[in-house]
């Protein structure tokens, strides 16, 4: 973690009370940390450390934008990040993570490197489904996706992918109400002649 020495906070030398640390995470940070979720971005970080007699309470504010692949078309897209996270650090004999919020570090070390924590806070702030705004997806990929999937006319998130051409095709002869209830995946089953036993 020598390349992330900038993100070392010397806890043992802090006096009791509040201390503020500020960082600017850029493309170099994300490339160096080599995480799977985010490869590029620009995020401003403010860390407020409150040293008490028994622990260090760390409040993180992260605001900025990261570039991640769209879950629909896989082209890069900008995703805003605005998250507030908390970490409590205590001194002990060996390093351990007691929970998502509590970390024990050896008192002999006297400092904590927060680089990976910052990356995790950003990655966890990204929604599971992250897509371009309507009309922003790669047109070639979107058209191929439409050809190879069943359309859910009730999925509001996919409204930008459904157009009049999607509703046509092999469904000719259906009324509007029948068309909305029609699912092309059942066509093969409907063509089977089943005998009543």
Image: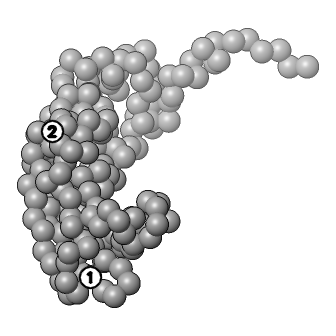
| Pick the front one: 134 or 20 | 20
Which residue is painted at 69% across and 12% down in the image?
A: 192
Question: Disc 2 on helix, strand or loop?
Answer: strand
Query: Which corner quadrant of the image does residue 154 belong to?
Result: top left
Numbered mark located on residue 51 in the image? 1
Vertical order, 123 against 40 (above or below): below
Query: Which corner quadrant of the image does residue 19 belong to?
Result: bottom left
Which residue is painted at 35% across and 80% down in the image?
A: 55
Vertical order, 138 against 44 (above or below): above
Q: Quadrant of the N terminus?
A: top left
> Does residue 92 appear in this view?
yes
Number of numbered labels in the structure image? 2
Residue 191 rendering spot, x and y as whole percentages: 63, 12
Residue most extreme to the front? 108
Residue 111 rendering spot, x and y as whole percentages: 27, 64
Numbered mark located on residue 130 in the image? none
| Sequence-first tag of 1 and 2 | 2
Q: Quadrant of the C terminus?
A: top right
Residue of label 2: 40
Q: Residues within 10 Å of mark 1 (few under 14, many from 20)?
A: many
Left or right of 49 in this view: 152:
right
């Amino acid at each position: 973690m020598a390349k992330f020495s900038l993100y070392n906070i010397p806890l043992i030398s802090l006096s009791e009370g509040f201390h503020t640390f500020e960082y600017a995470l850029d493309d170099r940070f994300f490339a160096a940390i080599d995480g799977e979720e985010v490869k590029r971005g620009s995020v401003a970080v403010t860390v407020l450390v409150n040293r008490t007699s028994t622990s260090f309470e760390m409040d993180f504010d992260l605001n900025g934008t990261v570039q991640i692949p769209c879950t629909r078309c896989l082209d890069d897209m900008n995703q805003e990040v605005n998250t507030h996270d908390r970490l409590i650090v205590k001194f002990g004999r060996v390093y351990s993570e007691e929970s998502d919020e509590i970390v024990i570090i050896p008192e002999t070390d006297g400092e904590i490197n927060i680089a990976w924590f910052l990356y995790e806070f950003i990655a966890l702030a990204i929604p599971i489904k992250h897509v371009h705004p309507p009309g922003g997806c790669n047109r070639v990929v979107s058209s191929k996706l439409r050809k190879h999937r069943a359309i859910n006319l009730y999925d509001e998130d996919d409204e930008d992918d459904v157009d009049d051409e999607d509703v046509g095709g092999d469904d000719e002869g259906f009324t509007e109400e029948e068309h909305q209830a029609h699912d092309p995946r059942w066509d093969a089953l409907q063509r089977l002649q089943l005998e009543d036993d």
